Image (spheres, rainbow, N blue to C red):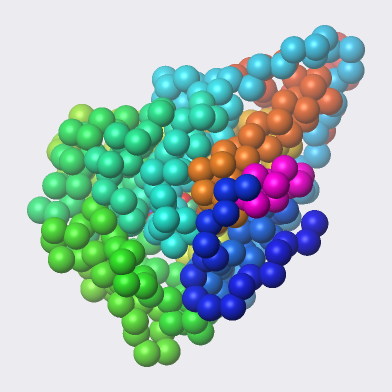
């Protein structure tokens, strides 16, 4: 589908709800939403959302790897009703797709993270709120209709980090998601080319009081990379996970693991779940696609914690593939973000609705009745094992 021309001038065009509704009605896929969202965004912001590290090898491989996973449709399986609901860390969700933490939602839409939280709630799923949100966490939780979990970047200033954790607990966040793949920011060439920075009026709202709200311009570079260099702790170790577990009563998820041995260590250090993630191809270019890493991690943790996965999920059938490979659920980053850019809350909700509808269809066509019960049997090679039965 073709997207409307982006009007001349800076920033998103003026909001027009009727036009939004009409454009959304014509959206058939998440990729359609991306076209619509991109067209509304400043090129600097579109490049930041879409971009990845280095030569984009990992970014592209994330999507390609899901496409390589073949499913084994079972016939005459009585799929008149399929149930996409499941639980993640005990939290009931209407579908096994959570909203991944992504920074700076007010670059996409003035309602920012509030709109995303409402959309996640409407879809019956969890929103993971980024440390680098542009709306304070207390306001996001207040606006939310469903569970909000807090994603943590550990600042060099441990007092500030502790304060973020305490605020997340007090605000009512249901879990803490520690991102471990970002000791420094990956080199994202397009961000350097566009001189990525936060425009006036948009700030990292959770750390305003500490004086760390601004992400300024850096000549020839990314303001966000400079922000990380200056403020985020590049020296985190396993001990720090123990420290974190000691300062919070929230369940801890460790996000950004691809190695089986790291996943095992995360479990040994008290993680309730690991998120197999390469940060959407934005950190180490050359890291494996998450669909390739997932089965090894699942095998290594051997049921001792839940395994979530993200990266390149654009289709409901990708969600089914992830479940078949052993994930409890996926997280989606760019998909709802493009929706938010396209039409605010309604756009983000549309992205999640598309994924759920596609998942339900894929489940029916695969002969799978319940998302909570999908197993390796749904994978094409696995059905060989059943030949003798
Ligand atoms: C624009 C953007 C901002 C992101 N910001 C964060 C962040 O603040 N914290 C974090 O842990 N991950 C962040 N991520 C990574 C996502 O949580 C997630 O791992 C990734 O987007 C998944 O890939 P997908 O976009 O292909 O679904 C960001 C990703 C994007 C695209």
Q: Which quadrant of the structure image shows residue 95? A: top right
Image quarter of the C terminus: top right
Residue at left 39%, top 69%? 185
Residue 235 visible to the viewer: no
> Looking at the image, which residue sits at the far bottom?
219
Q: In the rendered image of this protein, does residue 131 appear above or below residue 295? A: below
Apparent side of residue 66 relative to residue 51 in the rendered image (left or right)? right
- Camera-nearest residue between 206 and 309: 206
Q: In the rendered image of this protein, does residue 238 appear above or below residue 267? A: below
- Camera-nearest residue between 33 and 358: 33
Q: Which quadrant of the structure image shows residue 270? A: top left
Apparent side of residue 331 relative to residue 151 in the rendered image (left or right)? right
Apparent side of residue 162 relative to residue 195 in the rendered image (left or right)? left
Locate residue 168, reporting x and y percent. 23, 39
Residue at left 29%, top 34%? 142
Residue 113 visible to the viewer: yes
Please give the range of residues in magenta. 19-30
Locate residue 223, reporting x and y percent. 36, 77
Total number of numbered discs in the rendering? 0
Instruction: Please tell me whether the stretch drawn in magenta is mainly helix, strand or loop.
Output: helix
Q: In the rendered image of this protein, does residue 365 appear above or below residue 214? A: above
Residue at left 42%, top 22%? 91
Residue at left 71%, top 31%? 357
Image quarter of the N terminus: bottom right
Indicate yes or no whether the magenta region holds residue 58. no
Locate residue 119, reporting x and y percent. 50, 37
Locate residue 216, reporting x and y percent. 30, 77
């Amino acid at each position: 589908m073709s997207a409307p021309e982006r009007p001349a001038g800076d920033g998103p065009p003026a909001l027009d709800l009727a036009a939004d509704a009409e454009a959304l009605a014509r959206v058939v896929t998440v990729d359609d939403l991306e076209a619509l969202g991109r067209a509304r965004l400043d090129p600097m912001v579109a490049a930041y959302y879409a971009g990845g590290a280095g030569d984009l090898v990992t970014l592209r491989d994330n999507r390609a790897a899901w496409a390589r996973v073949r499913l084994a449709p079972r016939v005459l399986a009585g799929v008149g009703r399929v149930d996409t609901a499941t639980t993640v860390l005990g939290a009931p969700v209407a579908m096994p797709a959570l909203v991944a933490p992504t920074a700076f939602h007010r670059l996409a839409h003035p309602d920012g993270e509030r709109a995303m939280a409402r959309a996640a709630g409407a879809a019956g799923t969890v929103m993971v709120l980024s440390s680098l949100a542009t709306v304070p966490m207390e306001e996001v939780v207040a606006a939310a209709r469903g569970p909000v979990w807090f994603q943590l970047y550990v600042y060099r200033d441990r007092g500030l980090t502790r304060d973020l954790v305490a605020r997340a607990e007090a605000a009512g966040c249901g879990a803490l998601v520690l991102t471990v793949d970002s000791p420094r920011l990956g080199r994202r060439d397009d961000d350097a080319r566009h001189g990525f920075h936060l425009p006036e009026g948009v700030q990292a709202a959770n750390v305003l009081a500490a004086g760390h709200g601004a992400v300024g311009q850096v000549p020839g570079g990314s303001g966000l990379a400079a922000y990380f260099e200056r403020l985020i702790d590049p020296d985190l170790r396993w001990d720090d996970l123990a420290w974190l577990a000691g300062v919070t009563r929230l369940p801890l998820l460790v996000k950004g693991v691809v190695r089986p041995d790291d996943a095992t260590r995360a479990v040994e250090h008290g993680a309730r779940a690991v998120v197999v993630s390469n940060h959407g191809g934005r950190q180490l270019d050359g890291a494996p696609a998450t669909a390739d890493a997932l089965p090894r991690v699942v095998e290594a943790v051997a049921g001792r914690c839940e395994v979530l996965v993200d990266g390149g999920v654009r289709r409901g059938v990708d969600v089914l593939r992830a479940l078949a490979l052993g994930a409890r659920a996926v997280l989606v980053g760019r998909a709802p973000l493009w929706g938010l850019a396209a039409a605010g809350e309604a756009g983000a909700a549309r992205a999640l609705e598309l994924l759920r509808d596609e998942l339900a269809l894929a489940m029916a066509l695969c002969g799978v009745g319940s998302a909570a019960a999908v197993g390796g049997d749904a994978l094409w090679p696995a059905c060989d094992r059943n030949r003798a039965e």
